[in-house]
Image (spheres, rainbow, N blue to C red):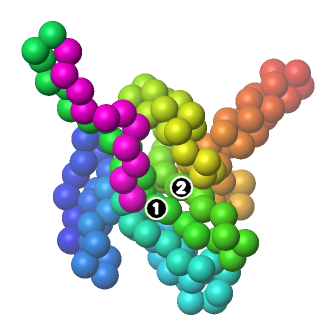
């Protein structure tokens, strides 16, 4: 496993010849491999690309296409597709890409992170709610 730092301070990790942006992303890859080996999912893809906006020209200026590159695309046993991004936090750029993705694609988009306190893998939206509730209870007591 080779490692180098990324812009968010996480370390790049290499497993099975694939380079992941963080240890947590590499850990999720291993989780997906286990799920596939145990017939819990059909299969998954690494770094699928989704076109959010075509390239265009306006007033003689060229504008590049906007793409969203997710961490994983999971094909479930029921035929549904879930697009997964492993994140510790939501960046402003991601919030915009998420809106564009949600409008254009039917797939479920999940942001997940790993928090031992809440039992392991958890969706970021759910984690935010749990933390908000915990903060309310702390203030109320």
- Residue 22 visible in this rendered orientation of the protein: no
| Residue 124 placement: quadrant | top right
Outermost residue, top side? 59
Within 10 Å of disc 2 (Cα), the crowding (few <14, some 14-19, many 20+) is many
Residue 52 on the magenta span: yes
Within 10 Å of disc 1 (Cα), the crowding (few <14, some 14-19, many 20+) is many
Residue 127 percent coordinates (x, y): 68, 43
* Distance of label 1 from label 2 (alpha carbons): 6 Å
| Residue 64 placement: quadrant | top left
Residue located beneath label 2 in the image: 83
Asked if disc 1 and disc 2 are in contact, CB closer than 8 Å, the reply is yes
Give the residue drawn at x 65%, y 87%: 39
Earlier along the polypeptide chain: callout 1 or callout 2? 1
Residue located beneath label 1 in the image: 72
- Depicted 36 relative to depicted 110: above or below: below
- Nearest the viewer among 30 and 81 is 81
Magenta highlight range: 48-58
- Nearest the viewer among 64 and 70 is 64
Q: What element carries label 1?
A: strand
Assign the N terminus to one quadrant of the image: bottom left
Residue 119 percent coordinates (x, y): 71, 61
């Amino acid at each position: 496993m080779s490692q180098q730092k990324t812009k968010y301070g996480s370390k790049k990790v290499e497993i099975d010849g694939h380079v992941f942006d963080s240890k947590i992303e590499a850990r999720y890859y291993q989780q997906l491999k286990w799920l596939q080996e145990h017939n819990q999912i059909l299969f998954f893809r690494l770094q699928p690309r989704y076109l959010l906006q075509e390239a265009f020209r306006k007033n003689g200026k060229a504008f590049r296409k906007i793409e969203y590159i997710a961490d994983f695309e999971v094909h479930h046993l029921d035929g549904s597709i879930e697009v997964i991004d492993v994140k510790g936090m939501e960046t402003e750029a991601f919030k915009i890409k998420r809106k564009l993705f949600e409008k254009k694609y039917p797939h479920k988009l999940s942001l997940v992170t790993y928090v031992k306190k809440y039992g392991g893998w958890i969706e970021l939206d759910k984690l935010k709610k749990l933390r908000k509730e915990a903060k309310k209870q702390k203030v109320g007591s």
